[in-house]
Image: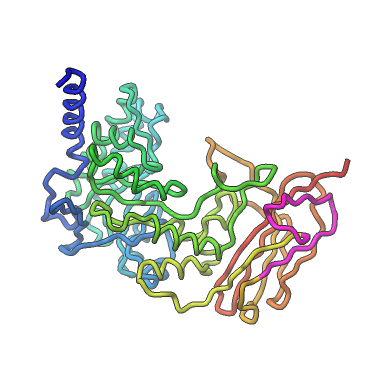
Amino acid sequence: MSIRIHSLLLLALTLSMVLSGCSGEKQPNRSAKVHIDQREGRYTLIRNGKPFHIKGAGGYSHFRELHEAGGNTLRTWDTTQLAQILDSAQKYELAVIVGLPLPNSGDISFYNDPQITQTRYRALQSLIKRFKNHPAVLMWCLGNELDFPYKWTYSDFYDSFNALTDMIHREDPDHPVTTTVLNFNPKYIFNIGLRCDVDLISFNIFSNLPLLRKDLDDLAWLWKGPYMLLEWGINGPWQGTQQTAWGAYIEDTSKKKAEIYQQSYRQFMPLNDPRFLGACVFFWGNKQETTHTWFSIFDEYGNVSETVGAMRGIWTGKPTPVIYPEIKYMLLNTQGARDNILLNPSANASAEVLLFKGHDRIRSVRWQIFQEDWYRENHLNSTRKLVPLATAESDGRNLRFSFAAPKQEGPYRIFATIYDNAGNFASCNTPFYVVSPP
């Protein structure tokens, strides 16, 4: 055997040993209320003595709807109103993955200042002590989409991160600790195993979900630990999503989104992987991210979209009995979103929503026009709530809307939200650009 091959084998063996803790080879504390059991290569999350497979959603609200849809877990990103969230979750028989927010490793000033790190440590320690015995707690998630760089210059970040995981394990041996990384990143997985002590790794994966099984197989020689998906869902307003000529991302209708949730879960989720502990769909609530409808499974008033029915089918194995409004598409001056619609300032325009079926069940339509949201902070999609430039309501008999284009040149969107007699909603929007004639 050549020296080079021998060195590579030795390196691989060393890495496997280094990653053994992250791979789940350490013996679980089977007396803990929640722990990860390993038997013959299969990992099982045990909660109160029984196997618990996560059927979860990310959000802070709509506990009853989550329970009725067959979900059993809520994932949060911070500790705002945590007591109320845990109490509500317990009422509806839901477990909570509690998010403990941390600055990312690149924010060096938050880690090389001892006063800041000590204050953060004491605050999280107090929180762990306060809530560790709440029956709704499932586990702790330290940070969200953190980077785990390999350079030793980030030692202050690792020192702080490890001090926190050690503290959580010491103060609360009854609940596991995880952290999330964006997509499947072998470098981060290696660095977590090399320099950290978490009980499992979690991923936030959207457009890369079809690649997950292959990514897992490709790294199985090095890492075979348990994992979860703490965010998954439709593709967002980012690279890879179709855009107009001026760079506005094209958003699918709520009907199309519900179909994508079902298809992605059934086709790409690693359901048969013995290391997979479950997943949390994104986003179980209403949030602004480029638009107010892109990821929102509920509207701002708490009304339900078809995605709730899609998730009920996924979690229970039974189709939903609810019939939701089904938008086929929107036309603006007889053109679709992919036609790069241009309007002159103050020009008369007409929008129309076409349905697959259910015209007789439509109660009302809300039309809104917004300026396109270009704002970015740290290259992240904007989450600031926008004010519509115009809003109009019509009854369900009229699915058309005539309006005058904005006077100011620039990019805009027109939204239509359709409500049925039961209060369920469907939504769609179309980007357009106002340009002055030459």
Q: Is residue 288 magenta?
A: no
Q: Residue at x 19, y 34 (%)?
A: 16
Dividing the image into 4 quarters, which one contains the N terminus?
Answer: top left
| 417 on left or right of 193 | right
| 322 on left or right of 10 | right
Tell me if I can see residue 391 in this picture. Answer: yes
Q: Is residue 346 magenta?
A: yes
Where residue 199 sits in the image (x, y, percent)? 22, 45
Q: Residue at x 17, y 49 (%)?
A: 173
312 up-or-down from 144: above or below: below
Q: How is the rendered protein coloured?
A: rainbow
Dividing the image into 4 quarters, which one contains the C terminus?
Answer: top right
| 231 on left or right of 299 | left
| 205 on left or right of 138 | right
Q: Residue at x 34, y 25 (%)?
A: 154
196 up-or-down from 434: above or below: above
Where residue 344 sits in the image (x, y, percent)? 84, 50
Looking at the image, which residue sits at the far bottom? 360
The number of callouts visible is: 0
Where residue 428 sits in the image (x, y, percent)? 63, 61
Looking at the image, which residue sits at the far right? 438
**Residue 393 falls in which quadrant of the image?**
bottom right
Relative depth, front residue between 93 and 149: 149
**Residue 67 falls in which quadrant of the image?**
bottom left
Relative depth, front residue between 221 and 88: 221
Where residue 10 sits in the image (x, y, percent)? 16, 26
**Residue 352 falls in which quadrant of the image?**
bottom right
Highlighted magenta segment, given as a residue range: 333-354
Looking at the image, which residue sits at the far top? 3
Tell me if I can see residue 131 in this picture. Answer: no
Relative depth, front residue between 145 and 307: 307
